[in-house]
Amino acid sequence: MNTHLRKILTLFLALLMVLSLTACGGSSQTPAEPERDDAEAVVPEQPAADSAAGDGQDASGSGTAVDPKAPVIDGLNYESTLELKYAKCFQVYRYEGGYAVIRVDDGSNYILIPEGGSVPDGLPSDVTVIRKPLTSIYNAATASMSLFAAMDGLDSITMCSLEEDGWYTEAVAEAMRAGKMTFAGKYSAPDFEQLLDKKCCLSIQSTMIWHKPEIKEKIEELGIPVFIDRASYEINPLGRMEWIKLYGEMIDRQTEAADYFDSQVGRVEELYSLENTGKTVAFFYINSNNAVVVRKSNDYLAKMIDIAGGKYVFEELGTEDESATATVQMSMEEFYGSAAEADYLIYNASISDPIGSLNDLLSKSQMFANFKAVQEGNVWCTEKSLYQATDAIGSIIMDIHTMLTDASADRLDFIYRLS
């Protein structure tokens, strides 16, 4: 091959790589809009992470059949694509030598570099480089922490954004008591000196960081890559939990992550073959302004109720609202009009303070005395740990199923009956 032809071919391959890695439609630096954190995030219809990625190029360079969505990386040979069952907001493409590319549905691209590996030549500037091994992570995406605990990967995290008394995941609280993990400031005000002193190698953030873009920029200026967790955008709640596979890829615990995910999914997949009970459920809490706060009909909690065999009482609530929130506030009168005949009420104590009895509920409004679920003794309350228990979504769904089908049930792992 003459020199002129070789130069043309090199330029052509470089152009293909740039188009492939930027095909998700955005830079990792510029989001379409900021969202709320995982506790309140909306779960809008989102395309699969790989549906807008790549252009069908052969990434192996050998002409053999590969995933047509795998990005072309100069000098790397495609190996495999991570198998996903429910998650639609990310994809991982693996390459020989321990390299991997993570694509997220907001257009962000990340490349995992194995220990001792070099960054591929010609990598686009908007691709975030994450070097392994990850031994000192600052995790400010609270809901993802239980996923690390589930695959015994907390040793990779040395800093977090909650004080010890804010954790309901016992393994995390224990790590803080033992000094293995320390509070390094909230996502909006991290302790930059601590990040440097502990040689932070990665900052994991929720989408709340887009409300403080200057913080993200400052972290990156310190040479620390930032990964933004978008699990809250998964339509299927089991898709949220499947992000454990992405984090398993980061800390080389792929087998543990897959095994744990399969064990949780195995608990609920049999429910898909069962006929829905038709029993209606309202999920809510009362805020400090005495307004009733409920989840939108397309929220992941509404989907969990459906998988468990129930019907979320609000069928089309907020589905046309494109604002970045998963909740709707309404007056007690409005709530009564929709939920008075609901078969079950579940009070969301993961956001509000827990209530211990029906009298506690009635103290918030005497109108509850006229609700069917109150009169029949079918009012339940969540544990405070619900929001942080991303690793236990399968167990939470089974709790709701037991509530719907076992009249003798009283106190389960994540919900309990009020009397």
Image (spheres, rainbow, N blue to C red):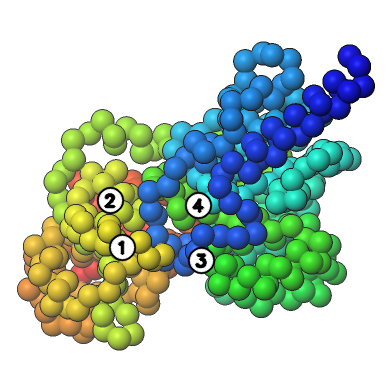
* 1 or 2: mark nearer the eye: 1
Kind of residue at badge 1: Asp
- Marks 2 and 4 sit apart, C-alpha to C-alpha, by 19 Å
* 3 or 2: mark nearer the eye: 3
- Badge 3: how crowded within 10 Å, few (<14), some, or many (20+)? some
The front one of 407 and 340 is 340
Q: Give the structural element (helix, strand or loop) at label 2.
A: helix
- Badge 1: how crowded within 10 Å, few (<14), some, or many (20+)? few
Numbered label attached to residue 305: 2
Query: On screen, 291 above or below 385?
Result: below
Kind of residue at badge 3: Pro
Can you give x and y, in whole percent of width and height, for residue 230 in the image? 52, 54
Kind of residue at badge 4: Ala
Assign the N terminus to one quadrant of the image: top right
- Which residue position holds label 3? 34
Can you give x and y, in whole percent of width and height, for residue 4 in the image? 89, 23
Sequence-earlier tag: 4 or 1: 4
- Which residue position holds label 1? 321
